[in-house]
Amino acid sequence: MVKFACHAFHPYFIALKRTSAKIREFVLPGSTPGASTIPKIAFEPSSPLSCGGRMFFKFANNTDKDSVASRMRQQRLQRFLDLIPKDLPVVRILDVGGTSASWAQTELPANCEVTLLNLEAETAPLPRFTSVAGDARKMPQFRDRAFDLGYSNSVIEHVGTLFDQMAMAAEIRRICRGYFVQTPNRHFPLEPHFLIPCWQYLPVGLRRRWLQNRDLGWMKCEPDPLRAQAEVEQIRLLTAREMRLLFPDAKLWRERLGPFTKSLVAWKAAP
């Protein structure tokens, strides 16, 4: 099993333990579970496109509040907050793959109660937050429509195969009356984990050999060929068509950066 995170460029990780802890936001190097702030990541961009490595990292570094990725994440989160019903005395929210740290700077309405689902529960969540251990693909601890809203950011591309993604989508739709599920767009030119343009279209063997020889984006060099291939294959980016099929009762929002769709959000307001 992998530890996961919830926001852009830091994967959720509830499926198989195939990737290194280097990119995890659940317990980042230098932090402790339940910490209210996310520490800076020591990172020296190293990629075959070294001349653009630092530029790509500056764009994608969501630990920097001024980066493009961080600004877009905040705008995305505001869209979710706009879905919160104002007329309910208590609004129950399920965050699949989130942490207290990711909500620390967010002003939630007073009527909100948030449950964080992770592979491991946090020991000291924020006030009005509850942390539970679980698997996004199967959440029998929650009854049907137990939550008013579900939230998941940069998670579903990491749960495993398409069958696993189908299972996670079905569980969110079962448990949550409304939801907001975001994932990076497969066809965005810059792959958000390895930070190499069009990385997702290259043959698996080429990507494996590349990762065996050097750090790539957030991913650390992995000399072992099987582990390198597992690192490459554990990310399954989704298309707009697949998101529509996974969430047929939702509307699809295309988050754009210039002429490109950077990420896809399936959202449904709570009835």
Image: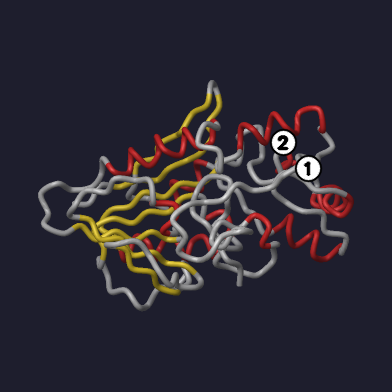
The reply to whether callout 1 and callout 2 are in contact (CB within 8 Å) is: yes
Q: Report the front residue among 150 and 55.
A: 55
Q: Which mark is residue 202?
A: 1
Q: CA distance from mark 1 to mark 2?
A: 7 Å
Residue visible at 54% across and 21% down? 259
Q: Which mark is residue 44?
A: none
Residue visible at 47% across and 52% down? 37
Q: Report the front residue among 8 and 229.
A: 8
Query: Judging from the image, what secondary structure is the residue with disc 1 in?
Result: loop
Q: Amino acid at mark 2?
A: Cys
Q: Residues within 10 Å of mark 1 (few under 14, many from 20)?
A: few
* Residue that sits furthest to the front in the current view: 30
Q: Report the front residue among 14 and 7.
A: 7
Residue corresponding to mark 2? 198
Residue 126 spot, x, y in % from top left: 34, 61
Q: Amino acid at mark 1?
A: Leu
* Residue that sits furthest to the top in the current view: 258
